[in-house]
Amino acid sequence: MSQLYNIIEPNVISEEMVQKAVEEQSQDEAGQLAKREGISFKDVTELQFSFRNLFCFVFPVALDILQIDNLWQFENLTKLQLDNNIIEKIEALESLVHLLWLDLSFNNIEVIEGLDTLVKLQDLSLYNNRISKIEHMDTLQDLQIFSIGKNNLATLEDVIYLRRFKNLRTLNLMGNPLCDNEQYAPFTVAHLPELVYLDFKLVSDTMREAAVLKYQYSTEPLKQVEAQALAQLEEKQAKQNELEYHKTAFVEYLNGSFLFESMYEEDAEAAKLAYLPGVGDLLQAYRKEFVSVCENLFNYGLKQYEKREAEVSDFYESLDEALTANQEQGRKIILEFENRNRTTLDEIQDVSSYDIAESKLAEYNEDILQLSETLMTLEMRTVDQLEELIKDFERNIAELVSTFTENVQGMMAQCRDLENRHHEKLLEISVNMLEKSVKNELDKNLPDDVRMLFVDKNTIVNAVNASHDIHLLKIDNREGDILSNVHRWQASVTEKALQNEIDRNRNRVKEIIQYIDYLQEELENMEALEPPE
């Protein structure tokens, strides 16, 4: 063995190492230019840190990588090679969300981890490491090729874990202890029926059919469990989608008793007062009426959301119609100009008189100036038209938001009225219980902390009022959230419409100027030609 490899120096991937690797792998003309002018790591899509690429020829030291780091800037990386190093842990890859291909073969990795954010990964190699269990890969649903041969996998249960990867077509497990099991191949094929290649060999239809038949009694229960898990996942996702829809309408958690229950979550005094005779029935009636108001607000909010969405959709539809008409008219004007001047340009080239040529060029120049004025006038009319559309849109949105706000405030006022009435009745019950306490007529079964509320009038009144204040604060906060969210949406949607129009107008004016400049440059080139004799 060469003396150059006698010394191994463990390294963390440093910023200097990253810079050097990028430069060395930029071999084309663009890469050489990047070396001189600087490299934006965001533009790098492939990166290689294999052992042989980091070998130092200045010193007799092999710069093996021990720890992954400093890759966070490569946010658009799609291919990463870290093979043939001494890496012990998969880490610092969370920012590489566009990664498709990852090679960590020939390292010292013992645990599969740190891959959660690599949801686009299609090809993963962990060949020749020290891994004893396949795990922590649930998010890699696009995985198609997986190489984990020559590791320490000893049980066929690891194969079952791979069933979750519905796109997996190529698998290499060769060199693991589990391969010594004579049932390894048929077991793997039966439990991964979509597999095309196993250990570099094509899975034949005959082998697949025999394997599936042999293990049908063990795979059927798995299918049932997986179907149930899938159904639960779909149900969970449907609920999450529904919640997101409610949030967009600003009425999340109002379709039930969520707000009511939140008022009592941190209310220790209410929990004590609930022991008083009659409070249970009072609370149940209050809850029913309160939830009814919340559900009315919820249903109203969803209807108003649909109205707002319809208004936004109608606005952009009208906007598109106006812009389409503008574009068609602009194209027509330019086409007429080009058709009209095509003959003029031919005549200029064929005329035998300098005076005639100069006259024709002057006419062409005048026509260019007229074209510029016509296109700019058309754009100004379009701006005026879109400005009116935007103003109407802003008024309509403001009216919808105002109506929504007024009704939300009205329904929240109903919630406060219910809370106030409940508070009055609860206070009445509490004062009556205080009179019983004075007469020593309290129920002996009442807990001691409840009895302590009736030491005097101030104590019980303060307890009831504290509970009341907590409830009113919850109602006020929920109302404030709804109103601030809808006003934030109003500002966002109207500002976006206005900014889009500003950007569109700026780009259109730039296009017109560039086109006119092109025509005038063409004219200048013609004028520079040698005049006819």
Image (cartoon, grey):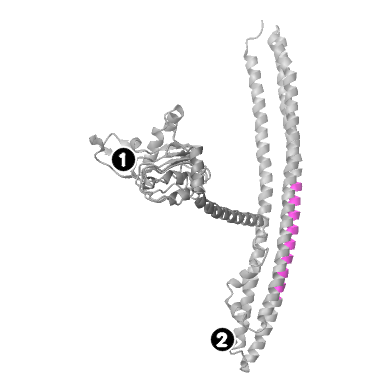
Which quarter of the rendered picture does the N terminus lie within?
Answer: top left
Q: Residue at x 68, y 45 (%)?
A: 497
Q: Residues within 10 Å of mark 1 (few under 14, many from 20)?
A: many
Which label was assigned to residue 136?
none
Towards the viewer: 506 or 169: 169
Query: In terms of image quadrants, where is residue 201?
Result: top left
- Please name the amino acid that badge 2 sits on: Met
Q: Residue at x 54, y 55 (%)?
A: 225
Which label was assigned to residue 452?
2
Towards the viewer: 149 or 203: 203
Q: Which residues, given as a range, are shown in magenta?
A: 391-420
What secondary structure is found at the residue carrying circle 2? helix
Q: Which residue is mark 1?
A: 63
Res. 474 visible in picture? yes
Towards the viewer: 138 or 96: 138
Q: Residue at x 43, y 43 (%)?
A: 185
Query: Is residue 204 depicted above or below 229 in this figure?
Result: above
**In screen coordinates, is 6 left or right of 274?**
left
Is-magenta flag for residue 369?
no
